[in-house]
């Protein structure tokens, strides 16, 4: 089902979705005529809670409190499973720091005072039962969650598949504001460090664990359809953005109107004084990340095609990724097939494994979109993420990555002829085949790497002979 198709599973909006009741205490309301940062001590708007029956991930009948007469320029979303609470706090703090920088811009035609109205931060929790209780405490402390509201059925007896909370909260910045420059290149006022900052927040708590692709379906085919943002930003819980990285990332979309998606550099969290480098696994992963982004991604970006858009830190122009690219990515979600009464794709290894890396599926489909000239780009912004520290977690992650990379590469190579359907110039289409050729060589090397290692070992041993003879 294409994202342009407005046919919903529920053509009518439920009564409680249209007139959702406000829970909690009515606090200080933020109006459009008030200052950007209200005085400390006042809080945000009243919390809104809406139970969602059945599967409304593809429905356009949702009424979101964040939908106003002001256009939502950006929707940043965090996918969450069972991570601890300190990772959520780490990511939210970095987002607030970046939103603060967007609001102190004075020479930007998009950002400046009041920019927080243009941004919605959406948190998706994949399963209520798997969430850490400490995470619920954090969400409660910022006013985004209230215990006791998440029921399994509605008053009408319908089964609930998700609980949607909306709240405009004031989050403390605690920034070193002397490190921030305004539009004139001057340091910002250091006395404003402790002021609170309003952030539009949405929280979707799914009642069961349906996977990350299902979370993306809620985001793109559900909330993004209603909010209609210009840009969407993918972040994993635990990712820490630099203080100005979000502005730099979004600025590329303003400078290049045909840019469909972009990603930044992902660096490993090395701990205080880089003590994590004492772990050989962390050292190897850190080296791999540096090579992968500073060499591979920059090489691919020169051609306009990226083989990887990491979900840890990437941004999409919604109009560029909508349609066939998103539809192909969401085919990996079994609940999407069931909800639309379609036959499930053949359970071949290719169809099963190519959807494991959701950040690879959408890349090729975006640049090969018929009658378009969309490009992908690597942007030199940095985001720090948490990496596996134990051998078990590392093997589980790499098994998923290697299987997905192998089968997604085969999928792209079988359909490379689709590039000629786009409106790219001949030079650009030829340039696209350069990273594809690199992928072929890497695929051949990976296929024979184990055999080459064994042959090299046996050959060297036979040449040297038995040292104990």
Image (cartoon, rainbow, N blue to C red):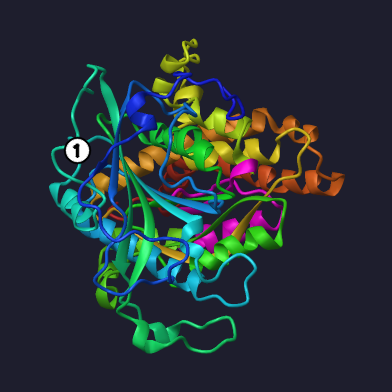
> In this image, 318 relative to 355: left or right?
right
Q: Does the magenta stretch include residue 299?
A: yes
- Where residue 163 appears, as percent x and y from the top left, is 28, 35
- Where residue 75 appears, as percent x and y from the top left, is 48, 50
* Residue closest to the eye, 307 or 122: 122
Q: Is residue 449 magenta?
A: no
Residue occupying the point 27% across, 56% down: 88
Q: In which quarter of the image is residue 268?
A: bottom left
The residue under label 1 is 130
- Where residue 346 appears, as percent x and y from the top left, is 49, 14
Relative vertical location of residue 18 with respect to residue 145 in this rendering, above or below: above
Residue occupying the point 51% across, 71% down: 113
Query: In this orientation, does residue 440 appear?
Result: no
Relative vertical location of residue 177 with respect to residue 385 in this rendering, above or below: below
Query: In this orientation, does residue 84 appear?
Result: yes
- Where residue 307 appears, as percent x and y from the top left, is 59, 45
Q: In which quarter of the image is residue 288?
A: bottom left
Q: Residue furthest right?
A: 426
Q: Total marks drawn? A: 1
> In this image, 249 relative to 433: left or right?
left
> In this image, 308 relative to 89: left or right?
right
Q: Residues within 10 Å of mark 1 (few under 14, many from 20)?
A: some
Residue occupying the point 24% across, 17% down: 156
Task: Look at the image and give the residue range highlighted in magenta.
Answer: 290-319
* Residue closest to the eye, 63 or 282: 63
């Amino acid at each position: 089902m294409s994202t342009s198709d407005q046919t919903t599973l529920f053509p009518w909006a439920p009564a409680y979705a249209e007139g959702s009741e406000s829970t909690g205490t009515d606090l200080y309301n933020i109006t459009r005529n008030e200052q950007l940062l209200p005085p400390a001590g006042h809080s945000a708007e009243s919390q809104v809670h809406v139970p969602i029956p059945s599967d409304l991930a593809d429905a356009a009948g949702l009424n979101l409190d964040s939908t106003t007469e002001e256009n939502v320029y950006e929707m940043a979303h965090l996918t969450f499973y069972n991570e601890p609470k300190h990772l959520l706090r780490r990511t939210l703090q970095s987002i607030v720091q970046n939103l603060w920088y967007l609001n102190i811009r004075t020479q930007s035609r998009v950002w400046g005072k009041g920019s927080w109205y243009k941004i919605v931060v959406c948190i998706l929790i994949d399963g209520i039962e798997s969430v850490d209780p400490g995470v619920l405490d954090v969400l409660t402390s910022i006013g985004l969650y209230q215990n006791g509201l998440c029921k399994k059925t509605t008053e009408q007896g319908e089964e609930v598949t998700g609980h949607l909370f909306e709240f405009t909260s004031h989050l403390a910045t605690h920034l070193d504001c002397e490190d921030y420059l305004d539009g004139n290149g001057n340091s910002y006022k250091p006395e404003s460090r402790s002021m609170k900052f309003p952030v539009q927040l949405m929280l979707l708590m799914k009642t069961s664990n349906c996977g990350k692709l299902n979370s993306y379906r809620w985001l793109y085919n559900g909330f993004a359809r209603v909010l209609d943002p210009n840009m969407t930003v993918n972040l994993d819980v635990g990712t820490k953005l630099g203080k100005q990285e979000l502005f730099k990332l979004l600025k590329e979309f303003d400078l290049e109107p045909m840019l469909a998606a972009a990603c930044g550099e992902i660096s490993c969290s090395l701990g205080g004084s880089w003590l994590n480098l004492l772990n050989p696994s962390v050292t190897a992963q850190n080296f791999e990340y540096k090579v992968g982004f500073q060499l591979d991604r920059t090489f691919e970006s020169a051609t306009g095609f990226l083989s990887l858009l990491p979900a840890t830190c990437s941004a999409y122009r919604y109009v560029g990724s909508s349609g066939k690219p998103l539809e192909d990515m969401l085919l990996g979600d079994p609940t999407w097939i069931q909800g639309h009464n379609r036959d499930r794709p053949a359970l071949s290894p290719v169809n099963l494994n190519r959807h494991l890396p959701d950040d690879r599926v959408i890349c090729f489909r975006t640049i090969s979109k018929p009658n378009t000239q969309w490009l992908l780009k690597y942007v030199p912004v940095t985001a720090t993420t948490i990496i596996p520290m134990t051998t078990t977690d590392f093997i589980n992650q790499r098994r998923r990555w290697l299987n997905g990379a192998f089968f997604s590469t085969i999928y792209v190579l079988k359909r490379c002829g689709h590039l000629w359907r786009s409106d790219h110039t001949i030079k650009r289409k030829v340039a696209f085949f350069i990273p594809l050729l690199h992928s072929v060589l890497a695929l051949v090397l990976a296929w024979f790497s184990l055999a080459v290692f064994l042959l090299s070992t046996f050959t060297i041993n036979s040449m040297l002979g038995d040292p104990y003879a």
